Amino acid sequence: MGRVYNFSAGPAVLPEEVLREAADEMMDYRGCGMSVMEMSHRSKVYDDIIKTAEADLRSLLNIPDDYEVMFLQGGASQQFAMIPMNLMKNKVADYIVTGQWAKKAYQEAQLFGKANKIASSEDKTFSYIPDCSDLPISPDADYVYICENNTIYGTKFKTLPNTKGKTLVSDVSSCFLSEPMDVTKYGVVYGGVQKNIGPAGVVIVIMKKDLITEDVLPGTPTMLKYKTHADAQSLYNTPPAYGIYICGKVFKWIQKMGGLEAMKQRNEEKAKILYDFLDESSLFKGTVVAKDRSLMNVPFVTGNEELDAKFVKESKAAGFENLKGHRSVGGMRASIYNAMPIEGVKALVEFMKKFETENK
């Protein structure tokens, strides 16, 4: 069997040339006689791998020197606790809840202080992004938190909230490196890499250095202090070494493809093919308010659960994997991250057209 078109929301499709390169280096990384999976994270060879990865990420995103880049573990979900533990100095934070992951982060923050839900789109099953131009920001809030792209619901902040001078913290897990971003607008940007960047097990945190201090909530474990990892340059303990190596290869691939502007154009072109079809289809429809649509995650339904199930089953048989929607919402979802080729999206639309004709 050849490669399938993998529309999984994460762990997700990776660029084929990255996988081939990793396969070529699996037994012997550049003449050192061993795999990256086997080498000491304290070795000169590995030090080059992690430092090059960081330098390439800095260059892709134009990350200024007053921001730290950390390669951590525990997924985005561990950041839900690390952020309040390290940043909730006044024990107050404001959360904008636009999906399940923002909601989980908001619930976690309640363990550490007063978390205020200052805006939400839960009233319409998270199918839109609320207006965030003039929110009731708490005067003593330590930060304002968003999940920028909502993987499950397929929405994306096109305009960042007006935080009225407060630090903005953003979970960008499912839109990381899909388009250019101005890091200086954020205090913290973080994301799990398993959507657009690498294998599951690495989370990248980009954080303004003046937010990284010893002044954390009492009882914060050593491993959950950003300062621990910043001081040790992500090598305090054994890092997810192989995962970081693959991330580094993906950064090189994005550079080769023309950087983040080129990625954005590619991603807009792919998303347009699918959204245009959904907008004219008489069977399928998208579930998100048009202006808030994500370029990365495209949820859609037929309006009939049995037909949805039939579509998922037949699409799998036709070589389209992981089109079933998240268990909390049902329906279908196509995740079309950076590494999904445009041919995959075109083939999916052709399949949907055929399905529509057969099931009218």
Image (cartoon, rainbow, N blue to C red):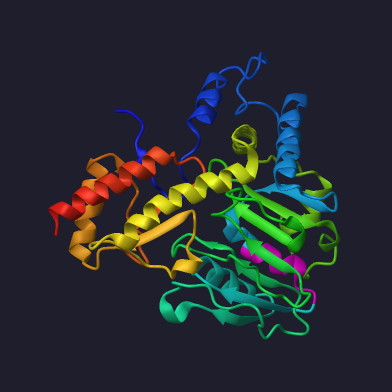
Foreground residue, 163 or 26?
163
Is residue 74 visible in this depiction of the protein? no
Q: Where is residue 13 shown, x and y percent of the image?
A: 46, 41
Q: Where is residue 164 shown, x and y percent of the image?
A: 75, 78
Is residue 126 visible in this depiction of the protein? yes
Residue 30, compared with residue 201, is above or below; it is above
**Which residues, given as a range, are shown in magenta?**
80-89
- Residue 67 in the figure: left or right of residue 10: right
Q: Where is residue 40 shown, x and y percent of the image?
A: 70, 29
- Residue 360 in the figure: left or right of residue 64: left
- Residue 219 in the figure: left or right of residue 344: right
Q: Magenta stretch: residue 246 in it?
A: no
Image quadrant assignment for residue 276: bottom left
**Residue drawn where x is 62% and y is 37% of the image:** 258
Residue 143, compared with residue 203, is above or below; it is below
- Residue 85 in the figure: left or right of residue 195: right
- Majority secondary structure of magenta residues: helix
Q: Where is residue 158 shown, x and y percent of the image?
A: 58, 65
Foreground residue, 262 or 121?
262
Image quadrant assignment for residue 237: top right
**Residue drawn where x is 67% and y is 41% of the image:** 239
**Residue drawn where x is 80% and y is 53% of the image:** 67
Q: Please state, as top left, top right, bottom left or bottom right, where the C terminus lies in the image.
A: bottom left
Residue 299, compared with residue 248, is above or below; it is below
Residue 27, compared with residue 67, is above or below; it is above
Count of marks placed on residues = 0
Q: Please state, as top left, top right, bottom left or bottom right, where the N terminus lies in the image.
A: top left
